[in-house]
Image: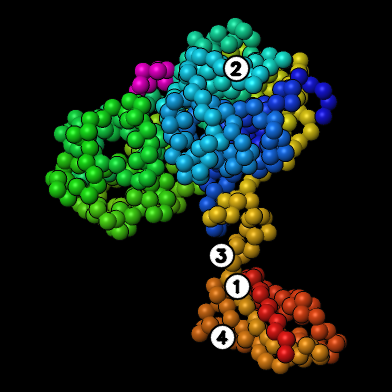
Amino acid sequence: MPDVDCRLVFLGGVGEVGRNMACLEVDGRLLIIDVGLSFPSADMPGIDLVLPDMEFVRDRADAVAAIVLTHGHEDHVGALPYLLRDLDRPVPVIGSAFTLELLQGKLEEHDVVGLADRIVAEPGGSLEVDGFSMRFLHVTHSIPDGLAIAVDTPAGTVLHTGDFKLDPTPIDGFATDLHGFAEEAGRGVHVLLSDSTNAEEPGHSMSERSVGPILRDIVANAPGIVVAACFSSHIHRIQQIVDAAIADGRVVTFLGRSMQNSVGAARRLDILRLDDRDVIDISEVDAFDPGRVVIICTGSQGEPYSALSLMAAREHKWVKLSEGDTVVLSSSLIPGNEPAIHRVVDALYRSGADVFHMPSDPVHASGHAAQEELRLLLSLVRPRWFIPVHGERRHLQHHARLAEEVGIPRANILICEDGDVIEIGERVVKGERVRAGMTFVDGLGIGDIGGEVLRDRRKLAGDGVVVVVVTVDAQSGELVDGPDVVNRGFVHEETSGDILEEARRRVIAALEESAAAHVTDPSALQQNIRRVLKRYFVEVTQRKPVILPVIMEA
């Protein structure tokens, strides 16, 4: 790579939503901005979590100066314990008070507490860590204590907005610090990285406060139990649900481990205002009139085994929904989750409950800036160079167009993808790419599930498996016993037994042909069986099951 003032390496979060991770390299030292994860899509069977490929950082573990976190959402902090384990040494981890409080349980769960030297970043404050000089600006988002981060480099300031919106009436009274952004503009912002999630949405995002009156009306008019499902980290939404419950003379209870953890962290920091006398344990619900209870839970995305999904399936230990009860799904529909959410909503309706959900009911406000807010920020900051981040390609493209509209030259706008290396000097250009992609977590296995394993899993899920067991003479290769043909998920044996019987005959013929050619190598015999059966199964079923020949020698 040519000699430049500094580099910005994207390992996740550009060209996709989730797995946000970038590395700012100055004089050989690395400042890592966010370490997020994403959740598996439907075509990733058996995968629990998806992490960024961290090889670039692992290869430079000694160069990592600090990790700075914009906010506490999983797509920005969820992969941190895995990175700390890879670095295997204490590293400064910088974030707001609430972000670090949320992280504590995660670090304990992964037994990496000793690897994180936690440093609280105060909005409006500054820090200098291992040569990196940073300033922090408060931004409003769907989680408390979001931060934008300005980092001084030899080429000028690199400003990362984090996830943000411009909410004029935030629940906690702390609006996005536009004055701070203006001050950064006065100093001169060399490169701006800005949230692109809602770059396709015209106008302004709804204020979070606009959801409160709707929630109050729903609770006040509900004759029975109210179940409100939302993201566990959305403390301002939880606060409004709590306020609606108390205004109607109800008590509240919290369901779901992540909900309990987030609420506990928010109450410890006095971010969530809630008196102990208004809270009950879920086991006490039956002791109260249904019209006096609000349950706040997880599961707004239709996650299997979440509290809401169990209620919908009438399998929850403490809550049995019936006619007169009310359910509110107070969140957006994350792309890809629609089928699961719709199944849960249908099941909730079958229980007799009234259901309120987006987009038919305005029970959610986005935490991301829409087009007019993005324009305002771009106009205020006036960066020399602009890189849209946090979004799929279409989001980045729309955000780039907005930047052009406010006067940033097209030549000074870079649309990036995971793996891009941005060389930051007087000019900002793309350099050589680095390896970037997905690391799959499957149970305790991290990184041992590659594309080939996923392909096999998809085939197993889609077309099933056929196991062929034969015994052959080790010297001649002649068939001694079998073949036994067993299938799972391919065809129904009682109705399609003729297919399996013909498969058996074709295996016998293939083995006789191999024996005549004096082929005795078990791997060659396995390959012959696969070839013969693959052709046959495609011919009669148009499907390609996984074929597993088992050769035993006699």
In this rendering, the label closer to the viewer, 2 or 1: 2
Mark toward the viewer: 3 or 2: 2
Instruction: Please indicate whether residue 142 sits to the left or right of residue 383 in the image.
Output: left
Nearest to N terminus: mark 3 or mark 4: 3
Image location (x, y in percent) of residue 87: 63, 38
Q: Amino acid at mark 2?
A: Glu
Q: CA distance from mark 2 to mark 1?
A: 58 Å
Q: CB of mark 2 within 8 Å of CB of mark 1?
A: no
User: In the rendered image, which residue does mark 4 sit on?
Assistant: 497
Residue neighbourhood size for the residue with mark 3, other residues' Cα within 10 Å, grouped as few (<14), some (14–19), many (≥20) = some
Question: Alpha carbon of mark 3 to alpha carbon of mark 1: how far?
Answer: 9 Å
Which SS class for mark 4? helix
The boundaries of the magenta stretch are: 167-175
Circles 2 and 4: CB distance less than 8 Å? Answer: no
Residue 465 disc label: 1
| Image mark for residue 287 | none
4 or 1: tag closer to the N-terminus: 1
Split into 4 quadrants, where in the image is the N terminus?
A: top right
Q: Residue at x 24, y 53 (%)?
A: 318
- Point out residue 82 in the picture as x, y percentages from the top left corner: 58, 43
Disc 2: which residue: 128
Q: Report helix, strand or loop for mark 2.
A: strand
For label 1, the SS is: strand
Which residue in the structure is indicated by mark 3? 461
Q: Report the Cα–Cα distance between label 2 and label 4.
A: 72 Å
Q: Nearer the viewer, residue 261 or 517?
A: 261
In three-dimensional space, the C-alpha distance between marks 3 and 4, rounded to whole angstroms, equals 21 Å
Q: Amino acid at mark 1?
A: Val
Point 63% across, 58% down: residue: 454
Q: What residue is at 66 percent from the left and 74 percent from the top? A: 547
Q: In the image, what residue type sits under mark 4?
A: Gly
